[in-house]
Amino acid sequence: MKSYERAKGKIDQLLNGEGLRAKATRGGAWLGSASLAEQVSRFARNMFLARLLAPSAFGAMAIVLSSSSLIASFTDVGVLPAIVQNPRGGDRAYLNAAWWLGMTRAVFIYVLIFAASPWISRFYGNPQLAGLLRVALLSTLLDGLISPRAKLAHKEMKFGRWALISNGGAICGVVLTIVLSLILRDVWALAIGYCSENAFRCIFSYIVYPGLPSFAWDKRASRDLLMFSRGMVGLSFLNLIFARADIFVLGKLYSPAVLGIYALAVNLIQTPANFVINTLSQTLLPALSHVQADAARANRILMEVTSWVMLLGLPIVVMMWLCGPSLLTVTYGPRYATAAVALGFAAAVTFLNTLNSMVTNLFFAAGRPALHRRAVFVSAVTMLLVVYPACKHLGIAGGQLAALIAITGSYLLQVLRARDITGLPILRYCKPLVPASLVSAGILAIGMSAHLLGLGMKPFASISVAVAACIIGCSLGFPFLTRRKHMKIGITPTTLL
């Protein structure tokens, strides 16, 4: 009875309390639920459209999104993290300055996209790309038009409101994409649907956070924004090289159909990974910002979250290697199974990228985004050096192998930098890799045994065995993490936040 009362009290504290842990828990629950709904809808859409549209449609759309990201990356000023990190971020004058800065950027980006679209179309030998770019990237303008007060949801950790705006708008766009695909049955459905997501977000933002921007200009707020932005200059462009160089190279070396198969296969793991990264980042950044003056406390938060990601993430990587062909066959159809090796490398990339993103939040919360930029520079340069020969000689799998090499160097550099900045204890930070590796080895042994028994040729049986082994293995590793948090680091549920 006493245990029940204690558990009930802790749950009640998390659900109704006003402490940082309670806010982060409630926020994570809102973001997790809404993001999960969005990602499930995207997954269902991709499964449906992979059988309705030709792979070349997804290949053309991959080039559209990558080309637009290239142009947008030159002008990213980090408005959202600046608002969250700055103590004055919730002031009306600060929000107003941030809106005008973001809107000016959006207009500039779209003008560049409009002008560059014919050149991009000629470069890839696809005359359809020019129109697709100009339509799909209207989403950039719509993103800039979102209510200036909407970013308060992050600052004040009211993530339920942000979930309605961001995830609700995305789900509405996904539904519209499916409807348009049934009518148009070509790539234009994807382009219009992509644009509609930000249209819905813009509408929802003014419903949840009404209020138009004013023409007043606060010099101090503008100066604070620009000072933070100096550390962000070039960061998005470098990130883009790492994230999209494979699309640019593969789009030039291979047909749109091959690129489409690759893009959908990699998306199978990147979609849930982006869900995890976004959810963690949107809760970790404000939480770490609240304790930015306490390095030891920030390290404890980082290490606990990292422990769980390591234990859950590494076994999933092994699972993707074991049943990749089966997953692609069941999800998209037999022709997509040719991208199984690329999917395996992509799983490893997303695992390291998730760990890397949490260290990045530590730097952003401290108001030092330039530290992250140095690591991204390493990954971008590595990607540029490796991606073309890898894709040329290894085919589509080379794109993700190059990304794996690049993210490994970036992640190691960030961890070492965190040790210098906050005194992060490297050995304690890495210790969860021991149980994660043991669990993964067990999953690998079970999977290999299943293949020897012939289950690897049966897609549903292969997936079932891999998933069951992953669940059992991760469950066995949980006691280690609980013991580690209480005995080695001194973290308890009440002292973490």
Image (cartoon, grey):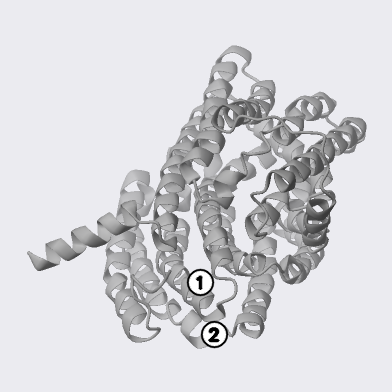
Q: Residue 261: horizontal and vertical position, in percent?
A: 61, 40
Left/right placement of residue 121 relative to residue 334 reads right
Q: Quadrant of residue 476?
A: bottom left
Splitting the image into 4 quarters, where does residue 286 fall? Answer: bottom right
- Residue 95 in the image, given as x and y percentages of width and height: 70, 44
Up-down relation of residue 303 to residue 96 (above or below): below
Q: Nearer the viewer, mark 1 or mark 2?
A: 1
Quick check: 296 left or right of 64? left
**Which residue is identified by label 2?**
426
* Amino acid at dot 1: Leu
- Secondary structure beneath label 2: helix
Is residue 251 something that shows in the picture? no
Dot 2 surroundings within 10 Å: few (below 14), some, or many (20 or more)? few
Q: Quadrant of the C terminus?
A: bottom left
Residue at image position (81%, 55%) is 220
Residue under numbered circle 1: 302
Residue 384 appears anywhere in the view: yes
User: Which quadrant holds the N terminus?
Assistant: bottom left
Report, in whole angstroms, how far the alpha carbon at label 1 lies from the one at label 2: 12 Å
Q: Nearer the viewer, residue 495 or 70?
A: 495
Q: Amino acid at mark 2?
A: Ile
User: Could you tell me which residue is drawn at 45 percent across and 77 percent down?
Assistant: 433
What crowding class fits label 1: few (fewer than 14 Cα within 10 Å), some (14-19), or many (20 or more)? many
Can you tell which mark lies on residue 86? none
Tell me if residue 326 comes above or below residue 62 in the rendering: below
Compare marks 1 and 2 and give the one earlier in the sequence.
1
The answer to which of 179 and 209 lies nearer the viewer is: 209
Q: Nearer the viewer, residue 443 or 255?
A: 443
Left or right of 205 in this view: 5: left
Q: Give the percent coordinates (x, y) of residue 317.
A: 47, 62
